[in-house]
Amino acid sequence: MKIILLVFLIGATLARDEGFFAQLRNSDFGKTIIQTLQVQLSQEHPADTVVHLLKQMKDDLNNEQRAEDEGITGQLKTCQDASSAAAAVLTIAKERKATSEERLPLLQQEQNDKKQQLFDKQGEEQRNLDRISVLQEARNAQRTEFEQRRDELVGLVSALQEAKKILSQGIGALKKNSFAELKNHHQNFLKYFPNKKGFHSMVNVLLTVLQEENTQENAAQKVVKIIDTLVDSIFQVQKEEMRADDARELDFLTQKERLLLANRRLSGSVADLNAANERIGQKILEIKNDISIQDSIIFNKSTEQADWDQTCSDTDRAHRQQTEQRNAQLEIIVECIDIFETRFDMETKSFIQRLRF
């Protein structure tokens, strides 16, 4: 019974070893192992020599793994450091962008306030100019009215003095043609001053009195005195009107100067507001440019960080895959060593040599 069991175990072990070697044909490394074994066996090398070769291959794989483990540590540290550096720059860029984005609306509001102030100051300045224009037009109308009034008074004085001259010449020996001359002078005066009805009525009365019989000389003397009084009164009126016009001129100049002074102050405020608005506009432009720059940095560094992270991941994955593949190769070699050290026989040798791909 024990013999049968032993035979069964030997057969099972042999079948397992043959299955192992047959399965090696499914991988490139397995094919390489089979070819190496076939070469060694075809040269009639003993099992110890084959084991020595397999152990050498095992050592080589272990050395490769150690070297790769050391190398991968440096590679991973390099890409991790690069990723961390990109992340640090990315964090700073995001913080700076957030700060700029917080400042931007405040500056824009400040700029809008300055623009509104500028608009108000310019409006006030224009209103002052409009008031000066209205004052100037009113003053021009007053000056025109004054000049017309002055010319009328000068004309009245001239007419009265001419009438006095005519009457003075006729007092001593009054002639009929003096009345005709005076009447003609009055008619000429009417052409130039047709609206002086009170004065014309007075002259008509005086002419009527002068033409009354037996009273002409006395009436002429009285009229001359009246004319002198009228002339003095007109001169007095002229002085009063000149003083009044001077007062109006002074009031006009005072108001105009006050408005011009206000505009000079406003001009200074407008200049300051324009300068402030320009400075704020420059700051806004700089902040917008900075936001754009930070966006570019964020995009570039995000891409860079993602690339480094992907590199780290790819490198680590490739290393793990290579390690797994190398471990699988080591398992194959260890299994081959075990076979050649413990149970290699002619049947195994024959089976290995018959393997084809």
Image (cartoon, rainbow, N blue to C red):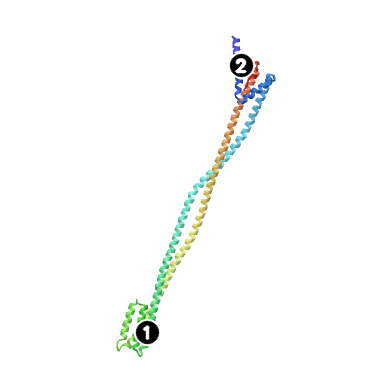
Is residue 282 found left or right of 163 in the rendered image? right
Residue 348, horizontal then vertical, whole percent: 64, 17
Badge 2: residue crowd in 10 Å (few <14, some 14–19, many ≥20):
some
The C terminus lies in quadrant: top right
Q: Helix, strand, or loop for circle 2? A: helix
Residue 232, horizontal then vertical, whole percent: 38, 80
Numbered label attached to residue 14: 2
- Looking at the rendered structure, the number of numbered marks drawn on it comes to 2
Where does label 1 land, which residue? 164
Q: Which quadrant of the view contains residue 156?
A: bottom left
Q: Is residue 306 visible?
A: yes
> Residue at the location (42% across, 67% down)?
135
> Residue at the location (56% across, 39% down)?
305
Badge 1: residue crowd in 10 Å (few <14, some 14–19, many ≥20):
many
Q: Nearer the viewer, residue 84 or 207?
A: 207
Is residue 182 found left or right of 118 in the rendered image? left
The numbered mark, 2 or 1, whose residue comes first in the sequence reads: 2
Residue 57, horizontal then vertical, whole percent: 66, 25
